Amino acid sequence: MDRNESEKELRSGKGLALYKVIIVGTIIVLCVMIAYLFIKDTSSQDYIYEAGEKQTKELVSLASNHMVVPDETPEVYLIQEPKLLIAEQSFFVGTEKGDYLLIFPKAGKAIIYSRDRDMIINAGPINFDNQFPPTPPPSDIDSANNDIQIATTTSGVE
């Protein structure tokens, strides 16, 4: 193919279409790379931990409007399946999906707080069962498989 043929091809539109495809392809690749970098940055463990820490502080502040809470950072569990928890322990009676279990290990206390209803559902002392591994740092996790035994309950605390 000589120079005259390639110039004719470019003028005929085939070459122009090829350039458009290359430009659009380059733009798509750049957008995917930018999206990947953004998602990777916001899903890092540091970002998740900071968001969990902020939410934990907010939950403690809200719960402290209803009762005196221990002066420590609790472990926070998001209650996903209250019926299963109620079947295992009566401590969870009255909970709904989306309520939070705040566990204060040093003080040996557990509090169930409902953000939607802005109330303490239950509070009581806890005993840790040492046969399970330690719990992760504060975050929103399913509480159905926690390793905590509620010793006694006090219903209707607000």
Image (tube, rainbow, N blue to C red):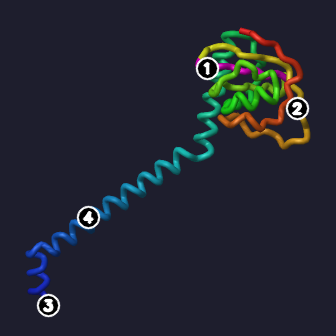
Give the amino acid at mark 1.
Arg
**Residue drawn at (8%, 81%) of the image:** 8
Front one among 117 and 46: 117
Front one among 78 and 76: 78
Give the amino acid at mark 4.
Ile
Dot label at residue 4? none
What residue is shown with label 3? 2
What residue is shown with label 2? 128
Asked if the stretch drawn in magenta spans residue 113, the answer is: yes
Which segment did they paint magenta? 108-116
**Residue drawn at (62%, 14%) of the image:** 118
Quadrant (top left/top right/bottom left/bottom right) for the C terminus: top right
Image position, residue 98 (x, y; %): 62, 27
Give the amino acid at mark 2.
Phe
At label 4, counting other C-alpha atoms closer than 10 Å, the crowd grade (few under 14, some 14-19, many 20 or more) is: few
Please say if the residues under marks 1 and 4 sit with CB atoms less than 8 Å apart.
Answer: no
Quadrant (top left/top right/bottom left/bottom right) for the N terminus: bottom left
**Main SS category, magenta section:** strand
Q: CA distance from mark 2 to mark 3?
A: 82 Å
Dot label at residue 115? 1
